Amino acid sequence: MAPSARRRRAHTSGRDLRRYAPLFAKRTTVMRSSAMRDLMELTARPEVISLAGGQTDTSLFPPGEFAAMMTKIAQEAAGKALQYGPTEGFARAKWCVREVMAAEGMGPEDDDIIITTGGQQAIDLITKTLIDPGDIVICEGPTYPGALPTFSAYEAEVLHVGMDENGMKIDELEQLLDRLGAEGRRPKFIYSVPTFQNPAGATMSAERRRQLVDIARSRELLIVEDNPYGLLRYSGEPLETLYGLDGGDYVVYLGTFSKILSPGIRLGWLCAPPPLMEKVVLGKQASDLCTSTLSQFFVGEFFRAGRWKSFIGESVDRYRQRRDAMLAALDTYFPAGAGWTVPEGGLFIWATLPEYIDTTDLLTRALGENVAFVPGTSAFADGRGRASMRLNFSGVDETEITEGIRRIGGVVARQVELYESITRPGGDGKQSGGSGSAGSGDPADGAGDSDGDGKVVAFRRQSLRPAQPEPGGEEGP
Ligand SMILES: Cc1ncc(COP(=O)(O)O)c(C=O)c1O
């Protein structure tokens, strides 16, 4: 037996760790795992309804079109498509980026753009370029859970600014900046997902956008705007991006084709002013030389065929139905005392439960019922978010969404019952959750007011519209 085969184990034991520990770089001690990645293994079982990932419905993409485009690439440009490409990306891919950004009112030049291996690499590259150990990154609380492992891998100190249904609270940001200033400290950048935020689903208001850009300009601070979802709007009016408002001096912009086309192609981008871009390019050279040439050709072909706008239109129609199905199910199956956001776009709803419920613990129970979500603590660097959860509505069809929320609601109801039986030994017959809560009063007392542990986002329970009719069968993937 080959030695490597003999030693192979499914899991690392404590002894293995001790043996390799002296080799590890110091930064590995502060690296944290991505909750979504960890969950993927558990949710891969077919019987599990996963509301955990940030998956799009890839069945929307017609296989025939996919095959025709790949065949065309193979026949017309196989040599180039199978070769290395420039680190900055191909001009054709940059043209696609400019098309997408123009649809949101932005007009970068080719030289402002680098094509990356997904939006995740764009986060990694900007952090690698700017962060030394101990440097401060300010972000919303909650923030994109996938950004936190990146910030900690580069040993940043992450500070959160609270948010409400209008996005990051700018007065709180100013207070934090003043406090840091008094200590002689400055953040390296402010990371924000202002539009249909992951995980909160909230969108920063136009006024706060202007205020944030003004702050960046007057205090000479860098903002990193991460905008994967801007074109996935289901209701309301589009808003100008931070990058559009600023013109690209103080705002670095991150985008991706993952949510508007396919996450599997791993294609994203970053826009930065020239001095920053030079360093980002060096960082990318060291990390992967160039982004997949084949993927860039694929996107180029898709855009050449002029299909991208209608494809986004189809995605928007489908996800709007799924969002509405999830909101209706939450109304039906989550107990009074729970609150959730009503996103105008994107892929996520953020629900906050009564504060005595710990959603990490709840997840274990939910997995026992074959349903998954992302616990709220994964969206904070400081352990907050315990009573909250992120729910994804794009990855499964309406029937599964409804069933998934019903199961989570059932697990929550049992927790509520247990709590009430402990805290009210006499029992007063108060509701135990589980059904019939639609439209019931204002539970702002129970969920989502600010500051306390786990009760972080000031959203109130609200209905977008009357409960939707049962979804039609044709929407299943
Ligand atoms: C805010 C945000 N940024 C970046 C990413 C990473 O996306 P990509 O698949 O392009 O790497 C995601 C994915 O969910 C996201 O929500």
Image (tube, helix red, strand yellow):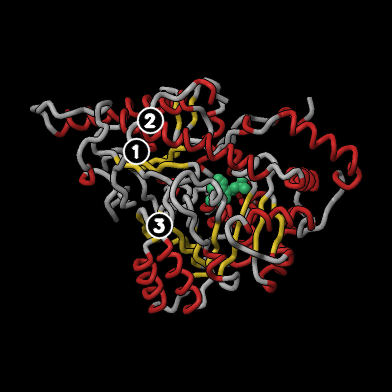
Residue 468's disc number: 2
Residue 167's disc number: 3
Report crowding for label 2: few under 14, some 14 to 19, many 20 or more residues within 10 A (C-alpha): few
Q: Quadrant of the C terminus?
A: top right
Report crowding for label 1: few under 14, some 14 to 19, many 20 or more residues within 10 A (C-alpha): few
Report crowding for label 3: few under 14, some 14 to 19, many 20 or more residues within 10 A (C-alpha): many
Whether residue 166 is visible: yes
Question: Is 5 placed left or right of 28 in the picture?
Answer: right
Q: Is residue 184 above or below residue 437?
A: below
Inter-mark Cα distance, 3 to 2? 27 Å
> Residue 419, how many percent across, how many down?
21, 32
Q: Is mark 1 within 8 Å of ligand 1?
A: no
Q: Amino acid at mark 3?
A: Gly
Q: Amino acid at mark 2?
A: Gln
Whether residue 133 is visible: no
> Residue 334, how many percent across, how many down?
30, 32
Which residue matches tag 1? 465
